[in-house]
Image: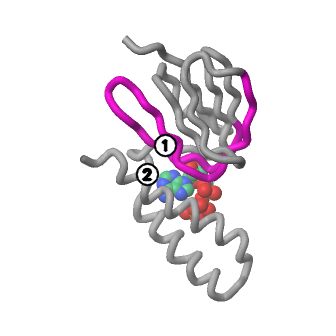
Amino acid sequence: MAKKIRLNIFTPDRMVYSENVNMVIARATNGDLGICPGHAPSITSLEIWSLRIIKDEGEQQLLLCGGFMEVRPKKITVLASCAETPEEIDIRRANAAKERTALRLKGDIDARRAEFTRKRAALRLKVSQSNKP
Ligand code: ATP
């Protein structure tokens, strides 16, 4: 059996994920990072992106609204402002957020905030499809 590393993901109100995994692929602010058991200790800031989790059973994805990741040889800790599994994502809500921000972007009101909301909504829709065959 392949070596494992513990992955713990926390948001301000809950523990979203806690499992032993084979590998994690994260989008850090300075590029994509693949983390396997035994990885050198590091602290990285994360983008709004999908976190890819590789296990013996296959790959899982999770939506991460940015945050920080601490890596130790046997443990990865992610602290994110929000994180959702594909099953938790409300597709109608994400579609509504996408439409609402498209209007806001056109009107140029709070364009930067709207851009981040649009990015989260688009990724939610992508991640929500990732567990479908
Ligand atoms: P909305 O305008 O619909 O709230 P948002 O992008 O502004 O979207 P966030 O600030 O990213 O929302 O998230 C606020 C909280 O709501 C977080 O706890 C997040 O997990 C949850 N959340 C937001 N959108 C969804 C969704 N489509 N499905 C499930 N949870 C969501």
Q: Which amino acid type is shown beneath numbered disc 1?
A: Leu
Q: Give whichever of 103, 30 is nearer the camera.
A: 30
> What quarter of the picture does the N terminus occupy?
top left
Task: State the separation of the CA atoms marked 1 and 2.
Answer: 7 Å
Query: Is residue 77 a member of the stretch shown in magenta?
Result: no
- Give the image quarter of residue 28: top right
- Give the image quarter of residue 126: bottom left
Question: x%, y% of residue 92?
Answer: 41, 65
SS label for mark 2: helix
Q: Residue furthest bottom?
A: 107
Q: Is mark 1 within 8 Å of ligand 1?
A: no
Identity of the residue drawn at 71% across and 38% down: 68
Question: x%, y% of residue 86?
Answer: 41, 46
Which mark is drawn over residue 127? 2
Residue range of the region highlighted in magenta in the rendering = 41-68
Earlier in the chain: of badge 1 and badge 2, it is 1
**Is residue 71 placed above or below 34 in the rendered structure?**
above
Which mark is drawn over residue 62? 1
- Give the image quarter of residue 108: bottom right
Q: Is residue 129 left or right of residue 47?
A: left
Dots 1, 2 in contact, CB < 8 A: yes
Question: x%, y% of residue 66?
Answer: 66, 48
